[in-house]
């Protein structure tokens, strides 16, 4: 509890849900053509602004949250440790899937994503 009392959590609310087919075409193309690393894994963060990093917050060996932090402004967004990835960050919003392994299974036009407006 001492560790958590020193943390500041940004209040956030998922504004809306959006289908894959309704995403910007640039984001659709990015998701369709994600690179795979040497362990056959997709990236957890797709930062189209170049200002964000994804940090796994841990207590001992356990991850309890994920923090998406803007390195320029210091503003951060906290997510449960089990939030599906990848996180896609644009200049206006954070987008992430509603289901796990959405990219691995193959993207369908009706796949749903959460959308958080970050320009408020």
Image: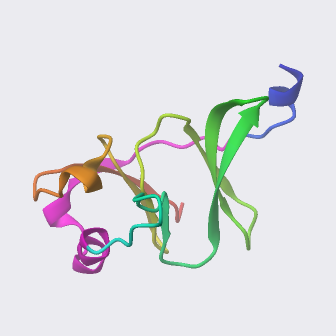
Asked if 13 appears above or below 61 in the picture, the reply is below
Pick the front one: 24 or 63:
63
Q: Is residue 5 left or right of residue 34?
A: right
Asked if 98 appears above or below 70 in the picture, the reply is above
Q: Is residue 22 left or right of residue 116?
A: left
Q: Which image quarter: residue 115? A: bottom left
Question: Residues in magenta?
Answer: 9-32
Pick the front one: 96 or 118:
96
Query: Can you say which quadrant of the picture contains the C terminus?
Result: bottom right
> Percent position (x, y) of residue 71?
73, 69
> Percent position (x, y) of residue 9?
70, 40
Q: Farthest residue toward the left?
A: 109
Residue at 47% in and 42% down: 13
> Percent position (x, y) of residue 53?
64, 63
Q: Farthest residue toward the top?
A: 1
Q: Is residue 57 magenta?
A: no
Q: Farthest residue toward the front?
A: 38
Asked if 96 appears above or below 35 in the picture, the reply is above
Q: Is residue 33 left or right of residue 88?
A: left
Pick the front one: 74 or 97:
97
Residue at 40% in and 59% down: 40
Query: Can you say which quadrant of the picture contains the N terminus?
Result: top right
Residue at 46% in and 67% down: 37
Q: Is residue 30 magenta?
A: yes
Tally of numbered discs: 0
Asked if 22 appears above or below 68 in the picture, the reply is below
Q: How is the image coloured?
A: rainbow
> Percent position (x, y) of residue 14?
41, 44
Q: Which image quarter: residue 49? A: bottom right
Residue at 27% in and 53% down: 104
Pick the front one: 57 or 24:
57
């Amino acid at each position: 509890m001492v560790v958590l009392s020193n943390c500041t959590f940004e209040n956030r609310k998922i504004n809306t849900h959006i289908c894959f087919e309704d995403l910007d075409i640039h984001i659709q193309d990015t998701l369709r053509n994600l690179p795979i690393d040497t362990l056959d894994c997709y990236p957890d963060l797709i930062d189209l602004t170049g200002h964000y990093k994804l940090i796994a917050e841990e207590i001992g060996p356990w991850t309890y949250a994920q923090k998406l932090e803007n390195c320029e402004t210091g503003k951060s967004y906290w997510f449960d440790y089990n939030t599906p990835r990848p996180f896609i960050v644009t200049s206006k919003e954070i987008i992430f899937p509603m289901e796990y392994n959405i990219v691995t299974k193959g993207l369908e036009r009706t796949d749903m994503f959460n959308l958080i407006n970050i320009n408020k």
